Amino acid sequence: MDSDARHGATVSGPTSGGERGSGAELAVALALLGTVAGGIGLVVVYLRGGQPQLEGLFLGGALVGLAFALGLWAHHFLPGGDAVEPRHQLASSEVERRSFVERFEGGERELTRRGLLVKLLGLGVAALGAAALFPLRSLGPRPGRSLRTTAWGRGKRLVTEDGTPVRAADVPVDAVLTVFPEGSTLQDRADSQTLLIGVRPGCLRPAPGREDWAPGGLVAYSKVCTHAGCPVGLYEAAKHRLVCPCHQSLFDVLDGAKPIFGPADRPLPQLPLEVGSDGYLRARGDFPDPVGPPSWEVP
Ligand code: FES
C-alpha cells in the first residue's frame, strides 16, 4: 500500500496541464474568439444601417460562443466533487512534496494560459455589451414640447383637406367640417386635425374666459379622441354630440366637448377662433390643452 492510499487522501482539483486540458483551453479560446467576432459583427452591421437577419445571426453566434466557453470552463477547469483528507500524519512525505512541486510548476503554466482565457472572456463580454448599447441610438431624439403643441398658431387660417380656406359665412348651422392649419404638412395634420361645427348662436355654454372663442356659433374641437387617439368622426347634430366610433365615447359640443359617456375622461381640447377682416376663420392660438390620450403627454 503506498503512502497516498494509506492515508486515504482523495483530492479533486483542476485538470492538470495535460493534453486534454490543453485541448479544452483551445476550445474555450476559440469559442470566446467567436463571441468577440459576433459582437464586433453586430456593431458593424448596425453602423452600416442594420440588417435584422444578419444582426440575429451575429447575436446568436456570439451568445452560443459565450455559452459554449462557459460550459467548457465549468466542466474542465473548476474544482468538482468532495475533498477528503484524514489527518493521521500532518507532515508530507518526500513523495508528496515532490509531487506537489511538479503539480505546482505545471499549474503555473496553466495559470498563464488561464490568464489569457480570462482576458478573452472579458473581451467577449465587452464586445457583446458594446453591441447591446448601440440600439439605444435608435430611440431617436427626445420629443421635448412637441407632444404638447400642434401646428396651430395665432392667425393661422382654417383650411379644408384640399387646402381651401374656410369663410365663416360658408359654414351653416349643424354643419361639421374637418379643418387643418393653413400650410401644415401631412405629418402636422395628425395631431392638428380639428372639427369645425356650426351651432345656433347662443346655444353654447362656454367656460369662463372662453366666451369669444366661437364667433357666430362656430366652435372648433380637436378631432383626436382623448381616450385612445381615434378620430372622432361622427356628429349627432340633433343632440349636439360628437361620437367616437372606437369605444363610443360621447362629447357634449355645447358644453366644451366634455365627455358624457364612454371611457374618455377628458374634454376634446377647444381651438380658439376669430373671424379675420377678410371673412376667413383663423385660429387665435394653439390648443390650450394637449391633444390626444394622456399617454401622449408622457415625454
Ligand atoms: S378612442 Fe375614442 S373612445 Fe376610445
Image (cartoon, grey):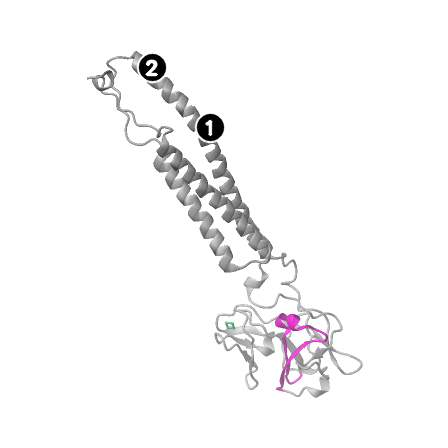
54 horizontally vs 148: left or right: left
Residue 30 x %, y %: 45, 41
Of labels 2 and 1, earlier in sequence is: 2
90 horizontally vs 50: left or right: left
- Give the quarter of the figure containing the N terminus: top left
Residue drawn at x 57%, y 70% as measured from the top left: 267
- Most extreme residue toward the right, as rendered? 277
Q: Which residue is mark 1?
A: 112
Kindly indicate the quadrant of the structure image that contains residue 172: bottom right
The stretch in magenta equals 174-201
Give above or below for 155 relative to 50.
below
Pick the residue in front: 137 or 108: 108
Is residue 180 rendered magenta in the image?
Answer: yes
Tell me the tag on residue 51. none
Is residue 36 rendered magenta in the image?
Answer: no
Q: Secondary structure at mark 1?
A: helix
Tag 2 near tag 1, CB within 8 Å: no
Circle 1 Cα neighbour tier, 10 Å, few/some/many (<14 / 14–19 / ≥20): few
170 horizontally vs 133: left or right: right
Q: Which residue is mark 2?
A: 97
**Residue 43 visible from this viewpoint:** yes
In 3D space, how far apart are the residues under numbered discs 2 and 1 (Cα atoms)? 23 Å
Q: Secondary structure at mark 2?
A: helix
**Residue 207 visible from this viewpoint:** no
Residue drawn at x 35%, y 18% as measured from the top left: 100
